Image (spheres, rainbow, N blue to C red):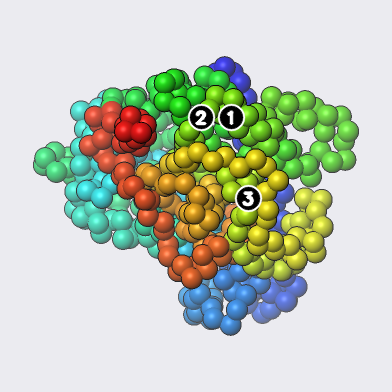
Amino acid sequence: MKHFYFLFLLLLSLCTKAQKTITYTSNEVEQSKKYIQGNKFQKDFLLYVDMLKQSHPAFANKGMPFNIDSTLTAGYKQCKKCKEQAEFSVILQEIAAKLHDGHTSISSNYSTDEMYPMYLFIDDEGVYLKSVQQGFETHLNKKIVKVNGNTISRVCDSFRKTISYGNEWEFRKMFKNTTQSLQPWKELGLCNSDSSIVLTFLDGDSLKLRPLSKRNIHLKDKLEGFAKAQILRRVQLLRQGNTPFSYTLIPGKSTCYLLFDQCEDRNTLLEKSYWKVQHSDSLKRELEKNLLRIPVFSDFLNQMFQTMKDSSIQTLVIDVRQNSGGNSRLCNELLMHLKKELKLPTVYIRESNLAHEHYKALGKDSIAWINANPQTVYSDKDIYEGNVIFVQGERTFSSAGLLITEAVDNGIGTLIGDYASYTPSHYGDIIYWSLPNTQTTGTISNRYFLRPAAEKAKESYIKPDVLLPATFKDYIKGYDPCWDWIINKQRSN
């Protein structure tokens, strides 16, 4: 079973890497005086800003998300002094962050081999040291109040301009990852001259950390409390599948627990890699053979709902706390088992040369995709009439966020859990790009998804019907408030 799950992760990783990358060019930019006279960083800076302006949905209307002219002037001057790729990536990332779009970012951002051997936990009460390099375990689980003499709130505020995020919970998620990398600390002037950082804890203790090569980092987590409880519980629930989605009937509870960990299945993974194998029948057959181990989501759902019907299941729990997204088609397939008429988000697609090249490379008709904008679908399924509970968490994002948004706006089920990192109305459908002079790579959104409840378009988050925050106190105690609420709810029924 472990081998099966690792195979899925490998296939998912390979398909992600297989995404077609489009090299961005512009005759108009490349013929300009600034481009011709600039160094390689200045040249790609001009191309990057032009790509955003010509391709991102935020620039489709007259109102600009930020001042292009001042950005061009300041950035071009800054790039003249660039000496390293990582430094250039930070400059571009600061521009991407202005869009407040978690899907538009620099892939090579902070790609240095040097990282701080730590991982943080953040809740409403503060920032804690969750994991640390072996040998420093005595500092685990402590609350951080300062870094190099700067308050932790000041450090967070400094990092905001280098992170692409749509709401506060996406910032927290990205902050935990970004603070592991040396480069942003250097660019923000927050580390010492020897690249070290000193963490000061609430109890007055302190810890000095120096960046290490990735291969020398061995993070230690006590794995006590919440993390261990979650691992054991998920292992029990996943016994039947160990795929991107699986379900378990909880004995004696008349409850089906669906773990929906990734919006990917056999068909979507094949689509992601199609461009790479389309000209080779043998490669295509090999890929299809490997993907046979991954279920088709529609077949999986038909089987699950039939089992629920045969077993008179009264409650369906859909847990997407670990689901970072994928293909939203799977989400709609699930929701069409739960409601006969489903109102979908309104999708605005930014037509551009980059988008046309992207769809062409994937073997799709770009014109058809540009014009596709369904708003309401009607289900031909037998609708499940029992209780439905959705569980979200900080890591719920992208297509998984669309699942929750559509469920809430269509009045389906009860939502429990913590605030999440997705924004209900958001940019998405990413295109992978590269710049010709520095080979910098990244992603850019191609669409804007306006939630079905359009009057709530400006809301940056959805508050659960039952708010059950994932706190650090619960983490170290091994308490999962969502699981306990679900079990107690069934007892009360």
Q: Secondary structure at mark 3?
A: loop
Q: Measuring from the top left, give residue 333's x and y in whole percent.
A: 64, 44
Q: Which residue occupies 79% across, 45% down?
A: 275
Whether residue 24 is visible, yes or no, is: no
Q: Are marks 1 and 2 in contact (CB under 8 Å)?
A: yes
Q: Is residue 139 left or right of residue 132?
A: left
Instruction: Say few, some or many: other residues with alpha carbon within 10 Å of mark 3 (under 14 / 14 to 19 / 20 or more).
Output: some
| Amino acid tagged 2 | Ile
- Local secondary structure at mark 2: loop
| Residue 473, quarter of picture | top left
Q: Which residue is mark 1?
A: 309
Mark 1 to mark 2: distance in Å?
6 Å
- Residue bearing mark 3: 340
Q: Residue drawn at (65%, 62%), measured in percent from left and top?
A: 375
Q: Position of residue 307 (x, y in %)?
A: 60, 26
The spot of residue 467 in percent (x, y) is 32, 48
Instruction: Identify whether 337 is placed above or below 431.
Output: above
Residue 274, by quadrant, is top right
Q: Quadrant of the N terminus?
A: top right
* Relative horizontal placement of residue 44, taking residue 114 as reference (left or right): right
Q: Which residue is mark 2?
A: 313
Between the C-alphas of marks 3 and 2, the distance is 20 Å
User: Callout 3, which amino acid?
Assistant: Lys
On the image, the x and y values in percent for residue 488 come to 31, 32
Instruction: Examine the rendering and report whether any part of residue 57 can be seen.
Output: yes
Give the position of the C terminus as an image quadrant: top left
The one of 332 and 214 positioned closer to us in this rendering: 332
Query: Residue at position x 54%, y 62% from top?
Result: 451
* Three-letter code, disc 1: Lys
Do the numbered discs 3 and 2 sit on residues whose CB atoms are within 8 Å? no
